């Protein structure tokens, strides 16, 4: 079964931390080119947060640089997003994404992150 399953969202106060997890099916994790996290706040477009390539290169949105870290665990087929120094403007639904080439992309169901001021 091809799927991405996110977890780890929740409610946190400003300045706090959360770690999101994205568990990928083996077929995705063995073939992805890039995996990443996107987020969508109410009334806004979905935006890129961070990505990691198969080769390990990472990329971050300017708004999260220095605060968020993307990593992957090859043993558990999981990609993580460690979020520190959270701000109210980080409040959004966070989605995991996998690009496996040939214009095929998979999305998870999303996990809500709410940062209170």
Image (cartoon, rainbow, N blue to C red):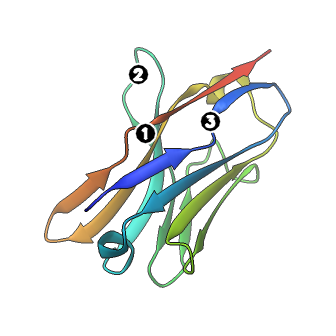
Q: Residue at x 84, y 34 (%)?
A: 16
Element under label 2?
loop
Task: Please state the horizontal and vertical placement of residue 114, each as a whole percent of the image.
Answer: 65, 23
Provide the residue designation for mark 1: 47
Provide the residue designation for mark 2: 44
92 left or right, relative to 12: left
Element under label 1?
strand
Q: Identify the mark nearer the N-term, 3 or 2.
A: 3
**Tags 1 and 2 in contact by the CB under 8 Å rule?**
yes
Task: Please state the horizontal and vertical placement of residue 5, each as a whole percent of the image.
Answer: 44, 50
Provide the residue designation for mark 3: 9
Residue reaching furthest to the right = 15
Q: Residue at x 38, y 34 (%)?
A: 46
75 left or right, relative to 102: right
User: Distance between the Cα atoms at labels 3 and 2?
Assistant: 19 Å
Q: Quadrant of the C terminus?
A: top right
């Amino acid at each position: 079964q091809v799927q991405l399953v996110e977890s780890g969202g929740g409610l946190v106060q400003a300045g706090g931390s959360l770690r999101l997890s994205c568990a990928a099916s083996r077929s995705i994790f063995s073939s992805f080119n890039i995996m990443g996290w996107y987020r969508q706040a109410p009334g806004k477009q979905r935006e890129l947060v961070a990505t990691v390539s198969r080769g390990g290169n990472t990329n971050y949105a300017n708004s999260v640089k220095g605060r968020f870290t993307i990593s992957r665990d090859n043993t558990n087929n999981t990609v993580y997003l460690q979020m520190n120094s959270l701000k109210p403007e980080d409040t959004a639904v966070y989605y995991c994404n996998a690009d496996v080439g040939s214009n095929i992309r998979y999305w998870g169901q999303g996990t809500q992150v709410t940062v209170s001021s």
